[in-house]
Image (cartoon, grey):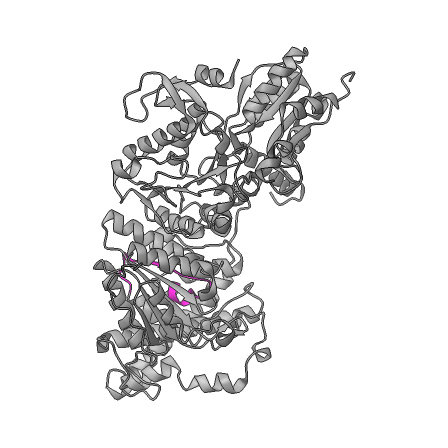
Amino acid sequence: MSVDAEATASATADSGGGTAATAPAPVTMTKALNAALRDSLAADENVLVYGEDVGRLGGVFRVTEGLRKEFGPERVWDSPLAESGIVGTAIGMAMGGMRPVIEMQFDAYAYPAFEQIVSHVAKMRNRTKGRVSLPITIRIPYAGDIGGVEHHSDSSEAYWTSTPGLTVLTPSNPADAYSLLRESIASDDPVIFMEPKSRYWMKETLSLPVTTAPMNRAEVVRKGSDVTLLAYGPTVRTAVEAAEAGAEHGLSVEVIDLRTLSPFDDETVSASVRKTSRAAIIHEAAQFGGYGAEVAARVTERNFTHLSAPILRITGFDVPYPSPKLEEYYLPTVERVLDAFETWDWEL
Amino acid sequence: MTIDVPPSTGRALPQLQPISFIGPDSSPTDAPTEGLSIPSDRTLLGLYRQMVHVRRFEAQVTHLTRQGRLATYPSAAGQEACEVGATTALAPNDWLFPTYRDSASLLTRGVPVAEILAAFRGDWHCGFDPHEYHTSPAATPLATQTLHATGFAMAAKLKGTDAATLTFLGDGASSEGDTHEAFNFASVWQTPTVFVLQNNQYAISTPLREQSNATMLADRAAGYGMPGIRVDGNDVAAVFAAVATALERGRNGEGPTLIECLTYRMESHTNSDDPTKYRDAEEVEHWKQFDPITRLETYLRSTGVLDDAGFDEITASAEELAASVRDAMNDEAVIDPSELFAHVYASPRASLGEQQKILEAELAAAGRA
């Protein structure tokens, strides 16, 4: 069973976007994101879309294609090439009653905006005792496996998840991409919306608009009884493939798509871990100080007496993201997952 | 091969000599005024009155800080003409985007004393409601607020309101990348934003000559296709007129303006640095002759707008303000520790609720619940 089919099965069409539901058809993640932006722009006149090349070109990944033409250059436009400027002006626009959706062209291109995100976007509500909300969605295409040149393949999620005040989402499939982006834009909290580049062209048969599980909830995408394998964004597919390979060896792997990295869905994850007694987390980012470290510690603290083995982190290596010819050695694979499972003492 | 060069849209550099109406000797100057008009006597008297108040406020707060009553305080003493002149030019619907050194502008904007001092007393990072005073929380990360002012002005432009924005920055902040991004975004988008650059000669201890090799900071506007002007920042008449005109330009759809105000920080950066390590007493003494308040006082007396009775009334009123500052400090705010968790997210988080319970248990165990 593929993750695509699972996602389709759990997704239901709704009328929340105010647009008529389309007939079921294959939809890529980029198309789903594009539809979410279109429906959000149509639903609320305060929604704005701007960033580098998001207007005429429709974004380097075509996520914003056609939106400038449909909604005009006062709703969707190309900004100057300066990420701190894009985020900093979005803060002012949100204070002025707008609901900006801004794009960082690539993961590493968000770093010039780090100060605006960490010092202001994350803190404005708190420093003003809730008097100023910043309903900003910051879209960040992230992670590798696309043969990208240097600085185009970073997994930057831990920078954002370690910052109180930010909500961090990452869809792994087109249905979630649509539904979670709609929810992010409607949220009064600022959202870092991380889009897995290598899954942009993944197709799923969908009717749009679609509503999946709400944000802040993880989802079991494949049931199992021996191991809980936690994944998000680009690694959900790897996790499902590893579960399929494990099944051939008699290993029943439950795969959970975290979907929201911050906050963490303790309830769903703990329920699974208490059932399986073993857990691992897979991500592309380097291991040391990475998101998996937090998850391993957190899940252990809450479920120690239910665990038969230490929680494993199956990740990229602790090296800078490599050039395209070395990507295959860096990225966590099905084999790395199964090898990790073999390090456990299965007699316990 | 030839490249078509668009015709020049006019990119004259600002004049070196700052715009000024009332000189250091309190006489009308023959300095350029760039088409600006001196404010009315009534406006000048109001500006004088407010400058006297903010100077007394700065002195009182600095004194309390030296007593250890406030964690720290960056005074704008000496820069009253910039703070008061620029802020007074704002219309009620305009928004102000201040920095940590602009408490005087908050006071001028009507923010209550206790709410201004909340940050420096350590009560809360921002003590006032930004929507009530149309004033953003004072930014500490340098120059970041210049982009917020630009974005807010863009929102106002898109919504078709008549709000303009004003942001303060310093000579040190003019080296930050965000300043340049804000100048560029504001000019490209033609937002109604006024950048008031208070060139007070020092970034903590670093003098202007080690900050920038530009002939003057106002020149930078030309590179962004934005008007830049240089003003005597100790002549409140010039600051008010320049800012009021720039705000009006913005409202008329003519885009942003950079106004460099030449001034001098009479106090140390905060109470925690020793200015004798980086500047001579003679230099501070030299700048006293340009003082913005005595200059205007003499001028207003010479024109008959201010007399002894008026002077006494204003002085007494400023003393009342100082007393209210002392009262505010004596009124210790009680801060509920649960507020730590209350404002982080619009939607409550279960894990924060768990951490709040830990704190409550700690407080209960210590008998502080």
Quarter assignment of residue B247: bottom left
Quarter assignment of residue A248: top right
Count up the numbered dots. Answer: 0
Residue A51, image x, y percentages: 38, 45
Residue drawn 72% across and 27% down?
A310
Is residue B273 toward the left or the right of residue A193 in the image? right
Q: Split into 4 quadrants, where in the image is the C terminus of chain B? A: top right
Quarter assignment of residue A64: top left
Residue drawn 31% across and 64% down?
B226
- Which stretch did the figure color magenta? B90-106
Residue B258, image x, y percentages: 34, 66
Quick check: is B318 in the magenta stretch?
no
Residue B273, image x, y percentages: 58, 72
Q: Split into 4 quadrants, where in the image is the N terminus of chain B? A: bottom left
Q: Is residue B307 visible?
A: no
Q: Residue furthest front?
A: B1
Q: Is residue A90 visible?
A: yes
Quick check: is B92 in the magenta stretch?
yes
Residue drawn 67% across and 30% down?
A313
Residue A108, image x, y percentages: 52, 45
**Residue toward you, B286 or A179:** A179
Q: Is residue B31 above or below residue B257?
A: below
Residue drawn 31% across and 22% down?
A15
